Image: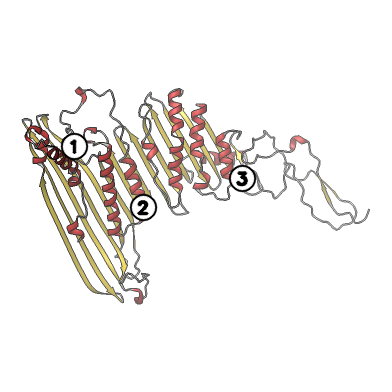
Amino acid sequence: MTGISSINVLTLNPSQLVGNPPAGVPSVETTAAVSAPASSVILGQSNVVEINTYNARGALPNAAQLPAWESSPLDKVSFTMGGNLSNSSNSNSARLAGLGAALLSQLAEGRKNISQSVVQQPGSKPLNAAELAAAQAKLHSNNADSTISLTLKTASGKTVTLSLANQDGGMAVQAQVEGGELTDQESAALAKMANGFQSAIDGLTAEPPQLKLDALTQFDSKVFSSVDLSTKLKLDDKNVQTLEFHADSQKRSVSMSGPSGDLQLSVDLKSQAILGNANQQAKALQSYLKQIDAAVARGHADRDLMSMFKDAFSSLNSNYPATRASSTPATVDPLAPSTLDRNLLTGLADFSASMTQTSQASNPMHPSERDTFAYNVSQTTRLKGSDPQNRAIEQDQQSSLNASYHQALSAGQKLKLTSNADSQNYLFYQVSDTANSQTNIAYEKGELTRASVSQSASQSTRISKYVMGHLVERTNTPVNTSKTQSFLDVLERALHPEKADKTPSGVAHLKELLAGLQDKVLLDSYPKKINS
């Protein structure tokens, strides 16, 4: 029997063919087994040909280990996790695709707590029990590379918490309800939020990221009292992006921080009396978005970061909660603006919003010349007085921009600043802008005594011109404008129609004047006099 090479022979009991299941396949309870070949028989010649054989665990010695599941993966969430895990990309967008919606839907359908994790085992050696437990615990903690948490509090006092985690070595999800079982109405409202939750996740994990928070601001206020979203997303080995979102009947807020900069927004919903109708709100919102675009162009802002700022501004200042039907005249603020007063208000809730771009030292020869951008905009309304007959309304709008940036000497040139003097031909801009608008309305003994709008705006543009690295010119151009307008006559005619022109043309003209008042009120950071 010459010519027969060395052969590894393995005889196993079927119960020894064990191993962790692949993604989306249920796990099998196993017992420990040795990894060395069971036996080796040598026949014939001494020359040996190595043949790969199965070890006592039923796997090739150098084969990669299959993923280890926390529990049997025979549900919608686990199938989604398994499919995402098999994707060649371990990015947050790939790993979390559809997972938030699946988790929220499964919780709404089953109303039972959920906990699942899947760990990719490195190399050919499986993790032991302690290592696997540690990996699972990390995925279920805030120490995972990327985490997303959604918390909803119901009007009945229950708390619903969902969490998702992703890192190179695996994924995990959890969902739980505290304070009692969900009712049919609560489960239905929860299910309706699934796509909105996923939309927020998809936006945050997109490249570049987006803030898609509309659905989270439009929660069913009859069922839920508040919504909170907290995220920490690893972008690369050095950078992390975080976000905190909150919404309830009194307030909405967003705080976001990342490598490109920070943004913060807050909307005060306590005083619904100052809110205008839907058309008025939409018009004011568009006016502010145009101002933001003008600030971006003026200060050369990071457009991706400013796009997120605009997304958040729109979401927080849209779809305000409806006034509760239980409100009675006794609970209405006696100093609340009348329908007529609201013509001289923006129609938006009070808010504050700011964005600060991470500064950059883009010029190695002049590192003190940093590229910066900081923008702030806000509205504050004060209701003053002792009774409806003697009261006043003050609404202030403010904005400010401080920015600096480098630009080539001519529009056709490409600026690339280096330590070489030949590259040091450029303009360094420093801009500082402010704008204010104040509305004042006052009544004494029931009679309107004041209805005015005062506005002011200023710009300062400082330009330093460099040629071959030498400062050759510096200019500073300040521009200011201001105006005050009284609308007492217009409102008086509306208050006392018996004194106004009652002809069809007179009535139409008054209606037109009232409709145009909002245009006179809205803050204009860059009025024509300055732009020209």
Mark 3 burial class by Cα count in 10 Å: few <14, some 14-19, many 20+: many
Name which of mark 1 and mark 3 comes first in the sequence. Answer: 3
Residue at mark 3 to residue at mark 2: CA–CA distance: 37 Å
The answer to whether mark 3 and mark 2 are in CB contact below 8 A is no
- Residue position for label 3: 121
Name which of mark 3 and mark 2 comes first in the sequence. Answer: 3
The residue drawn where x is 33% and y is 48% is 310
Residue at mark 1 to residue at mark 3: CA–CA distance: 64 Å
59 up-or-down from 470: above or below: above
Q: Residue 511 sits in which quadrant?
A: top left
Q: Which mark is residue 463?
A: none
Mark 2 burial class by Cα count in 10 Å: few <14, some 14-19, many 20+: many
Mark 1 burial class by Cα count in 10 Å: few <14, some 14-19, many 20+: some
Residue at mark 1 to residue at mark 2: CA–CA distance: 33 Å
- Residue position for label 2: 305
- Residue position for label 1: 342
Q: Residue 116 sits in which quadrant?
A: top right
496 up-or-down from 360: above or below: above
Identify the residue at the far right of this view. 1
